[in-house]
Image (cartoon, helix red, strand yellow):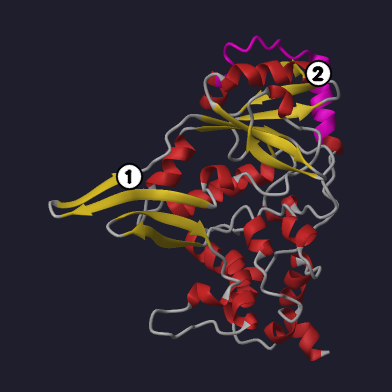
Amino acid sequence: MIVSKNDIPSFLDKLIGEYQVFAPVQEGSYTLFKQICSGADAALTDGNTKLPAKEIIFPQSEKLFSYNVTAEGAKLESIIDDRKKVVFGVRPCDAKSLTLLDNVFNNDKYQDPYYLTRRANTILVGIGCNSPASTCFCTSVKGGPFDTKGLDLLLVDIGDAYVVEVVTEKGKTLIDNAGFASASEADKAAAAKAKDEAQVTCQVNTDGLKEKLDVNFYDPIWEKIHEKCLGCGACTYLCPTCHCFDIVDDAVDCNGCRVRNWDSCAFPLFTLHGSGHNPRTSNKERYRNRIMHKFKYFVDNFGEIACVGCGRCIKNCPVNMDIRVVLEDVRGSEARLDS
């Protein structure tokens, strides 16, 4: 199927009547995913958004339940968001990140009803990346500018229109009555050409990285790698796969609610025990944990690297730390130390 770019706003307007619709919205010099009230608000021409789409499924702050304690007992009221959602214009790396987060929030030990309910009620409509940024390295972590993993529909930009590829039954249902025309052979050829010409110029060699991390916990390389890091946590908040959180109670007397807030392993308080002991007292230990978690522990637990190569941490680090360089340092630690 094919849809003209001029028809996208009216298509979104129709969806808004049935779904909460989220799309990139211009905010100064960048775009952010926000719920839109008009299809005309969607800004689909830029590349990736400043923040990933994960916040729609895993909010930065959310009430889990409210409670009230009286002489008769305690009353709990769960707060689960089951509204139907469409995330329009998500890029393939962000869609893939949700498939990685699925491992965290839905496994044989733990199922998170808040995340899973939103996930089940959300349709992801992706737009492929015709011109990946110089900081993108999705192809190095088993992704790609037109990867469909995690998506329900993929739109391929061919100029004045998008060729629409149906990935799942949910995606098909979304456009069953949209009135999109069938794509011609010329349209399909244009889409194939766009895919062929999309070049991810940056490559990160992850061969042997996991094996290296298996044995280098105490390697002196960590003394150098972390030195520039400020521990500000910006990379973790911008990362589509980071998922650390804290739980707090917000209460007055016997009435209150339990709230889940994003947290960061870059912060000293994150691992501070109630006893006062902290197993990661230094910046070195916290930065090592971030790398270990993404490229060793997540692989140990779920068989996949917890990085989608979106490049946000590279673009937005205040001291220009580059995870691509860090990984090369880790892979070459023996050679560098021998030199």
Q: Label 2: few (<14), some or many (≥20) within 10 Å?
A: some
The residue depicted at 51 percent of the width and 66 percent of the height is 300
Task: Residue 106 in the image: state x and y as whole percent.
Answer: 42, 50
Q: Which residue is mark 2?
A: 187
Q: Amino acid at mark 2?
A: Asp
Q: Quadrant of residue 316?
A: bottom right
In front of the other: 316 or 94: 316
Q: Is residue 204 visible?
A: no
**In the drawing, does residue 321 fall left or right of residue 166?**
right
Q: Position of residue 268 (x, y in %)?
A: 56, 77
- What percent of the width, then of the height, locates residue 9? 71, 20
Residue at 42% of width from left, 49% of height from top? 63
Mark 1 surroundings within 10 Å by alpha-carbon count, few (fewer than 14), some (14 through 19), many (20 or more): few
Q: Callout 2: helix, strand or loop?
A: helix
Distance between mark 2 and mark 1 Cα atoms = 48 Å
Q: Which residue is mark 1?
A: 78
- Observer-nearest of 245 and 124: 245
Which of label 2 and label 1 is nearer to you? Answer: 1
Q: Quadrant of residue 247?
A: bottom left
**Which quadrant would the N terminus be assigned to in this image?**
top right
Q: Say above or below: 123 vs 60.
A: above
Q: Is residue 107 magenta?
A: no
Report the quarter where the C terminus lies: bottom right
SS at mark 1? strand
Task: Residue at 80% x, 34% y: name it.
Answer: 195
- Checking the image for residue 151, the label placed there is none
Residue type indicated by callout 1: Ser
Q: Which range is magenta?
A: 174-195
Q: Is residue 185 magenta?
A: yes
